[in-house]
Image: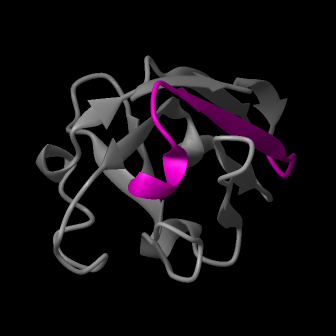
Amino acid sequence: VQLQASGGGLVQAGASLRLSCAASGRTLSSYQMAWFRQTPGKDREFVATISLYGTGTFYTDSVKGRFTISRDNAENMVYLAMNSLKPEDTAVYYCAARMTSRSDSYNYWVPGSYNYWGQGTLVTVSS
């Protein structure tokens, strides 16, 4: 599956953005999807994940209550709605996909457990 992330930009603190991830090559419902982010000099950080049919989600603590991950399998799209953005949310955001026979909760925060990655979209939040 090929992934294409978009929707990043420069916003002020407190603003909202919605990131999109378009999938092609294979039906999205075969994959658990996730968003990660990375800043220069740091490891890629887990942000959120959603199960194959959207029935389960997990978030990193710092974004709980502000970010919402969703998916539309019919359109082969995954979204990350980001509200109340903070300067510390500034990063390149990546969408990722994995096909696994294990539970959705198994190592979902580990970048290496995902097989496919998009190219990243930059989110910059100014104070």
Q: Farthest residue in the top direction?
A: 119
Residue ID at (23%, 34%) = 42
- Magenta stretch encompasses residue 85: no
In depth, the one of 24 and 70 nearer the eye is: 24
Q: Quadrant of the C terminus?
A: top right
User: Can you give x and y, in whole percent of width and height, for residue 107 in the image?
Assistant: 17, 69
In depth, the one of 70 and 74 nearer the eye is: 74
User: Can you give x and y, in whole percent of width and height, for residue 117 in the image?
Assistant: 34, 29
**Is residue 124 found left or right of 119 in the rendered image?**
right
Residue ID at (20%, 62%) = 100
**Is residue 80 found left or right of 81 in the rendered image?**
left
**Is residue 7 found left or right of 118 in the rendered image?**
right
In depth, the one of 106 and 17 nearer the eye is: 106
Q: Quadrant of the N terminus?
A: top left
Residue ID at (36%, 45%) = 97
User: Can you give x and y, in whole percent of width and height, for residue 79 in the image?
Assistant: 68, 48
Residue 53 is drawn in which quadrant?
A: bottom right
- Magenta stretch encompasses residue 18: yes
Give the magenta-colored segment's residue range: 13-32
- Colour scheme employed for the rendering of this structure: one colour
Q: Farthest residue in the left direction?
A: 112
User: Can you give x and y, in whole percent of width and height, for residue 124 in the image?
Assistant: 65, 27
Q: Is residue 122 depicted above or below 102 in this figure?
A: above
Q: Is residue 32 visible?
A: no
- What is the total number of numbered labels drawn onto the structure image? 0
Q: Is residue 120 depicted above or below 65 in this figure?
A: above
Residue 99 is drawn in which quadrant?
A: bottom left
Residue 116 is drawn in which quadrant?
A: top left
Q: Is residue 112 visible?
A: yes
Residue ID at (84%, 52%) = 14
Q: Is residue 32 depicted above or below 91 in this figure?
A: below
